[in-house]
Image: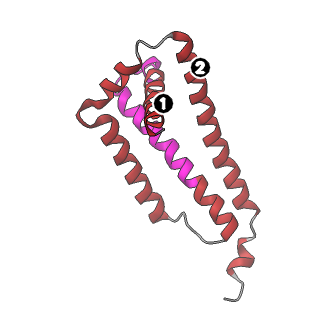
Amino acid sequence: MMRKIGKAYNYFFFAVYRLMETAPSRWWSEAKAALIISSLEIYLFAALCFYIESISYVPLFTTITAIVSGIIICAFNSYLFLYNNRWQSTIEMFVDMPRNRKILYDGICVLVTLLILSSLIFALYQMSIVDWESIRNAPH
């Protein structure tokens, strides 16, 4: 199970890397791919924190939490993909994959990305519904 998750994570990097290679500026595509994956992970973490905040009314996603989680996530992805040029072996794993499987897996990557972004938007909407003023002024 963990091996499949790791392979899916590596394919997601491969898909983002290929997208960055088709962009007009092809420099540092591996760093841009790692940054995009880190951004999506930070969005997912923020969405989870916002969901919990809207249910429990306890502020979890503070400035310190955002900075520390961002540093940890970026350091993890930098180590996983950029340290000792590990991204090259990740790319080589998927280059010879059949075209129809690439199309299927790319579609799954797009759906996961849209799911993460829509969950962040919905979590922000949930946060806007909460009457924070009455919670702040409530007697403790």
Magenta highlight on residue 33: yes
Rounded to the nearest whole Å, what is the CA distance between mark 2 and mark 1? 12 Å
Residue carrying label 1 = 12
Q: Secondary structure at mark 1?
A: helix
Q: Kindly tell me whether residue 129 is visible in this rendering.
A: yes
Identify the amino acid type marked 2: Leu
Picture quadrant of residue 17: top left
Pointer 2: residues within 10 angstroms few (<14), some, or many (20+)?
few
Q: Classify 77 as above or below 95.
A: below
Report if the CB atoms under discs 2 and 1 are less than 8 Å apart: no
x, y percent for residue 61: 54, 63
Q: Is residue 67 above or below residue 12?
A: below
Q: Which residues are magenta?
A: 20-46
Magenta segment includes 45: yes
Q: Name the residue beneath numbered marker 2.
A: 104
Estimate the x, y position of residue 33 in percent, counting from the top left: 42, 32
**Which residue is painted at 56% across and 54% down in the image?**
46
Q: Foreground: 126 or 63?
A: 126
